[in-house]
Amino acid sequence: MRPLEGIAVVELGMWVAAPAAATMLADWGADVVKVEAPTGDPNRYTLRHVGQDIDSAPPFETDNRGKRGIVLDLRSDEGKDALERLLERADVFVTNLRPGALERLGLAPDELRDRHPRLVIGTLTGYGWAGAERDRAGYDVSAFWARPGIAAMLNPAGEPPPGIRPGLGDRTAASNLVAGVLAALLRRGRTGEGGVVDVSLLRSGTYANGNDLALQNFFGKRGRTRHRTEHESPLYNSYRAADDRWFWLVGLEGNRHWPGVVTALGREDLATDERFATGKARRGHVRELIAVFDEEFARRPLDEWAERFDAEGVWWAPVQTLAEVSADPQAEAVGAFVEQPGMGDAPMLRTVATPVAFWGVDDKPRGGAPTLGEHTDEVLRELN
């Protein structure tokens, strides 16, 4: 039995964050009904938004599998009434509409709590429900990466921020929302009362950036992001092997990991070099040590370094391409990928699993993403 069997969820979401949260709940057993406007979730057309003439939408399918999809026009009395009847039977309502939009629809949390006191309401916004900017549009690039200072820390000061891959902040916030919803359901089991779970991309981003913000608040200045050639910890840095494959040394505990690295290199002389013999000495000569490492690591392909590292207990990881990740046997072993039915008549889709496994439970997708309005008649019949 999946852990959320018997839990009814209504999702009024679009793009990534709220739909991703609802997909986790669906994978874990909840009956999720996705409510869309007649034009559909804009993420259905994600590739067309960037100029590609293609109808396939693998990101949409990934974040909407296992749901029943219905179309309601919430500007009409009929649509509002149908949604209200859905919420009467639901345990959870998940949405990422902006506060003002929910208020105009009569779906603000306070209003919903008055009408449905047992309902757990999960809202995921860009900038929260308080403050002057609560109704500002907030995609993850703006509200998770840019505004909380993450993008500014990824490159050294003075350099432009790097390109940001889509959806990373959305899925982080989605996981936060799911955690909050589950906590609220636990509380409801004790008190009989629902509640409001308020997650924002901004607060999720500041939490994710907690190390650097804690240092900023304590010292009154930012930590320094350095070029790899002057990284303050050469044992915790990226390097390139002879076959042009990059890898990361993960020797965060310098004195503990130093002996294994020099042995793997075959450069035991470095252990007695006064520039590198102690952690303090290495910190004062990072450029020299990184230059030595660069020269040595360029002598062998990564597969040879992998054998040497593992033999000496050196902590490291390859910097993999997406193609390598998709073929990674360890990723396969931990269940990182799943096969789900294609949307409509589309073929099977291999995509990412949700990030939690339950031992002894089949938590594979139970269905693909719904076509627009696929289950409208079915779900509305259940309400009669």
Image: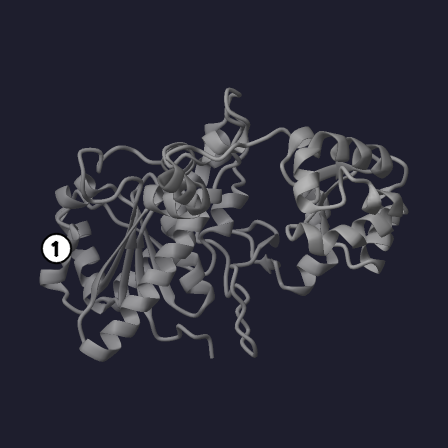
Callout 1: SS? helix
Question: Residue 78: where, in percent of width, then height?
Answer: 16, 51
Question: Residue 32: where, in percent of width, then height?
Answer: 36, 62
- Above or below 246: residue 312: below
Seen from the viewer's position, the closer of residues 17 and 75 is 17
Seen from the viewer's position, the closer of residues 286 and 375 is 286
Q: Quadrant of residue 336?
A: bottom right
Residue farthest to the front, as pictured: 274
- Is residue 368 toward the left or the right of residue 199 in the image? right
**Can residue 268 be seen from the camera position used here?**
yes
Image point (47%, 64%), residue name: 27
Seen from the viewer's position, the closer of residues 222 and 101 is 222
Question: Residue 199: where, in percent of width, then height?
Answer: 30, 51
Residue behind mark 1: 110
Q: Give the mark count.
A: 1
- Is residue 262 toward the left or the right of residue 320 in the image? right
- Is residue 135 toward the left or the right of residue 171 in the image? left
Q: Quadrant of residue 176?
A: bottom left
Question: Residue 382: where, in percent of width, then height?
Answer: 27, 68
Image point (47%, 42%), residue name: 167
Seen from the viewer's position, the closer of residues 51 and 170 is 170
The residue type indicated by label 1 comes to Asp
**Quadrant (top left, top right, bottom left, bottom right) of the C terminus:** bottom left
- Is residue 212 toward the left or the right of residue 308 in the image? left
**Can residue 320 be seen from the camera position used here?**
no
Q: Quadrant of residue 162?
A: top right
